[in-house]
Amino acid sequence: MENIVTSTIICPQCAGENKFPTDEKFIDCEFCGSAIYIDKRKVVTHYMVNCNFTKERADGNLRRWMSGNFHVKDLDKNAQVTAVYFYYFPLWYIKIKDTSTERIYLQPAHSTSISEIKNIDIPAGNLKLFQKKEHNMKDFINPDIQLSAAQSWLKSSGVPVENATETSLVHIPLYQFYYNYNGKQYTAIVEASSGKVYANTWPAKSETPFRLLFGSSIGLLLLASILSLIVALAASDGSEGWIFLYEVIKVFLYILIFIPLVIIAYIIAKKV
Ligand SMILES: [Zn+2]
């Protein structure tokens, strides 16, 4: 005879006593139908966020993000997307009540290279109870970071986790894009409920031309000051007026230098 090990799970929504096999992690409460996730002995409500974006629309958002100011010029046109994956990523959702406000802290429940993911904004109204029957479980990434690990991580960064009023597991829909630019591979995530793009690294504008320009401007200004001093002293022939003359020549030379510098900086900014 086979021995089925069961344990009693108290539903966090209705307090109903559910009996389930101990190896089951995702269950539905048999009394109220709530989705429950079991992390070790901790039982939390299991939510998900609906996907509102098709792959094509997510790609459109990625291209708009690529054309932004912080990225290298024409990244949106020159980046080659090599792979796109859709999945629901698990996050620990911890609501903490302060004296006056309520704040939500998110921690990845699975290892990820994109740490920006914890800055995702999940409006409370977007949380839907997870329904196992309605989804393909292959799209859902199982948590491999335990709740206790996420809590101690938050605690170590000064978050009072003992004041948590709600703790749950939330699966958020993501498109993960891999793209090549100049022989290097990058990754970016499009969060598929809001369409926002998240990335830790990207091909940035090169700063070298700006540094060179800055260095040469300092040199030119110093040279202009020395030149003004020599000319002023020579022209005033030792009289008191040399300081005034020096300032006038200096301001004139500074303006003469600044105009082309601004134009060059503008041209560089357009090109890189
Ligand atoms: Zn229940």
Image (tube, rainbow, N blue to C red):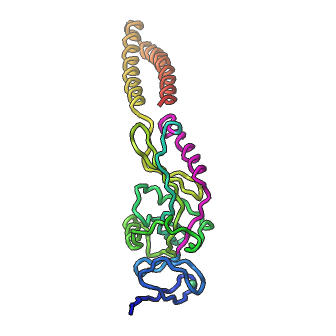
Residue 28 picture quarter: bottom right
Q: Residue furthest bottom?
A: 1
Residue at (41%, 67%) from the top-left corner? 154
Question: In the image, residue 4 lies at what x, y percent?
Answer: 41, 89
- Quadrant containing ligand 1 reads bottom right
Question: In the image, residue 124 lies at what x, y percent?
Answer: 60, 67
Of 4 and 264, nearer the camera is 4
> Considering only vertical position in the picture, is 4 above or below 247?
below
Residue 152 picture quarter: bottom left
Residue at (42%, 34%) from the top-left corner? 206
Of 80 and 165, nearer the camera is 80
Asked whether residue 115 appears in the rendered view, the answer is yes
Asked whether residue 101 appears in the rendered view, the answer is no
Residue at (62%, 58%) from the top-left corner? 52
**What segment is highlighted magenta in the picture?**
46-75
Of 267 and 59, nearer the camera is 59
> Considering only vertical position in the picture, is 255 above or below 101?
above
> Considering only vertical position in the picture, is 110 above or below 271?
below
- Judge left or right: residue 106 versus residue 133: left
Of 190 and 168, nearer the camera is 190
Is residue 47 a member of the stretch shown in magenta?
yes
Is residue 101 a member of the stretch shown in magenta?
no
